[in-house]
Amino acid sequence: MSMDTVHNYYERLVINEIREHYLDKHLDENQLADMACIALNRLPPRYIRFDIDMSFYMSTHEHIEVETRVKKAVRKAYKKISKFSEDEFVAEAE
Protein backbone atom coordinates (compact mmCIF):
# COMPACT_ATOMS: atom_id res chain seq x y z
CA MET A 1 0.00 0.00 0.00
CA SER A 2 1.44 3.35 -1.04
CA MET A 3 0.85 6.28 1.31
CA ASP A 4 2.91 8.78 -0.68
CA THR A 5 -0.08 10.87 -1.66
CA VAL A 6 -1.36 11.42 1.90
CA HIS A 7 -0.56 14.88 3.25
CA ASN A 8 -1.93 17.75 5.29
CA TYR A 9 -3.89 20.11 3.03
CA TYR A 10 -2.53 23.15 4.88
CA GLU A 11 1.16 22.33 4.27
CA ARG A 12 1.28 23.67 0.73
CA LEU A 13 -0.82 26.71 1.64
CA VAL A 14 1.43 27.63 4.58
CA ILE A 15 4.63 27.15 2.58
CA ASN A 16 3.25 29.26 -0.27
CA GLU A 17 2.22 32.02 2.14
CA ILE A 18 5.72 32.07 3.64
CA ARG A 19 7.36 32.10 0.20
CA GLU A 20 5.12 34.89 -1.08
CA HIS A 21 5.29 37.22 1.93
CA TYR A 22 8.16 36.38 4.26
CA LEU A 23 11.27 35.46 2.25
CA ASP A 24 12.36 39.11 2.27
CA LYS A 25 12.31 39.25 6.11
CA HIS A 26 15.96 38.13 6.46
CA LEU A 27 15.14 34.81 8.11
CA ASP A 28 17.40 31.81 7.65
CA GLU A 29 16.21 28.37 6.48
CA ASN A 30 15.83 27.09 10.06
CA GLN A 31 13.69 30.06 11.05
CA LEU A 32 11.49 29.62 7.97
CA ALA A 33 11.04 25.91 8.73
CA ASP A 34 10.23 26.71 12.38
CA MET A 35 7.77 29.31 11.20
CA ALA A 36 6.02 26.72 9.00
CA CYS A 37 5.83 24.27 11.92
CA ILE A 38 4.41 26.89 14.28
CA ALA A 39 1.81 27.97 11.73
CA LEU A 40 0.80 24.39 10.91
CA ASN A 41 0.40 23.58 14.61
CA ARG A 42 -2.09 26.47 14.86
CA LEU A 43 -4.27 25.01 12.10
CA PRO A 44 -6.51 21.95 12.28
CA PRO A 45 -5.04 18.96 10.45
CA ARG A 46 -6.84 18.11 7.21
CA TYR A 47 -5.30 15.04 5.68
CA ILE A 48 -6.11 14.35 2.07
CA ARG A 49 -4.69 12.49 -0.87
CA PHE A 50 -5.24 15.07 -3.61
CA ASP A 51 -5.55 18.86 -3.21
CA ILE A 52 -8.10 19.01 -6.00
CA ASP A 53 -10.48 16.85 -3.95
CA MET A 54 -10.47 19.40 -1.13
CA SER A 55 -10.71 22.41 -3.40
CA PHE A 56 -13.52 20.95 -5.49
CA TYR A 57 -15.82 20.35 -2.52
CA MET A 58 -15.24 23.66 -0.71
CA SER A 59 -17.52 26.63 -1.18
CA THR A 60 -16.17 30.11 -1.98
CA HIS A 61 -16.80 31.06 1.65
CA GLU A 62 -14.77 28.06 2.85
CA HIS A 63 -11.89 28.94 0.49
CA ILE A 64 -11.81 32.48 1.90
CA GLU A 65 -11.96 31.15 5.47
CA VAL A 66 -9.05 28.77 4.85
CA GLU A 67 -6.99 31.56 3.27
CA THR A 68 -7.71 33.83 6.24
CA ARG A 69 -6.73 31.10 8.73
CA VAL A 70 -3.46 30.44 6.90
CA LYS A 71 -2.53 34.14 6.74
CA LYS A 72 -3.30 34.59 10.44
CA ALA A 73 -1.36 31.47 11.50
CA VAL A 74 1.69 32.45 9.43
CA ARG A 75 1.58 36.05 10.68
CA LYS A 76 1.50 34.85 14.31
CA ALA A 77 4.32 32.39 13.60
CA TYR A 78 6.40 35.21 12.12
CA LYS A 79 5.84 37.32 15.24
CA LYS A 80 6.94 34.43 17.44
CA ILE A 81 10.06 33.74 15.35
CA SER A 82 10.91 37.45 15.29
CA LYS A 83 10.60 37.66 19.07
CA PHE A 84 12.89 34.65 19.53
CA SER A 85 15.42 36.23 17.16
CA GLU A 86 15.32 39.53 19.09
CA ASP A 87 15.72 37.71 22.42
CA GLU A 88 18.74 35.78 21.10
CA PHE A 89 20.28 39.01 19.80
CA VAL A 90 19.88 40.69 23.20
CA ALA A 91 21.33 37.65 25.01
CA GLU A 92 24.36 37.57 22.70
CA ALA A 93 24.98 41.29 23.21
CA GLU A 94 25.08 40.95 27.00
Image (tube, helix red, strand yellow):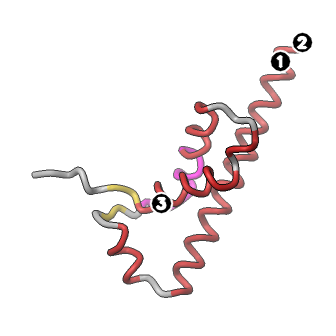
Q: Closer to the observer: label 3 or label 2?
A: 3
- How far apart are the two marked residues, 3 and 1, measured between alpha carbons? 34 Å
Callout 2 secondary element: loop
At a point 23% along the width and 50% down the height, the residue shown is: 4
Say if 80 sits above or below 39 in the image: above
Q: Residue at image x 83%, y 18%?
A: 91
Q: Where does the C terminus fall, quadrant-wise?
A: top right
**Amino acid under disc 3:** Tyr
Question: Would you place residue 31 above or below residue 23 in this image?
Answer: above
Q: Is label 1 in a helix, a strand or a loop?
A: helix
The image position of residue 16, as x and y in percent, is: 56, 56
Q: Is residue 42 covered in magenta?
A: yes
* Amino acid type shown at disc 1: Ala
Q: Position of residue 8 (x, y in %)?
A: 39, 57
In the image, taking residue 17 as reference, residue 91 lies left or right, namely right
Q: Amino acid at mark 2?
A: Glu
Q: Say if mark 2 contacts mark 1, CB within 8 Å.
A: yes
In the picture, the disc for residue 94 is 2
Magenta range: 37-45
Q: Is residue 20 magenta?
A: no
Direction right: furthest residue: 94
Compare marks 3 and 2 and give the one earlier in the sequence: 3
Above or below residue 23? Residue 92 is: above
The residue indicated by pointer 3 is 10
Q: State the separation of the CA atoms marked 2 and 1.
A: 5 Å
- Compared with residue 65, is residue 21 higher up or lower down, i.e. above or below? above
Q: Which residue was labeled with disc 1?
A: 91
Q: Looking at the image, do the residues carrying marks 3 and 1 touch, with CB atoms under 8 Å apart?
A: no
Local SS, label 3: helix
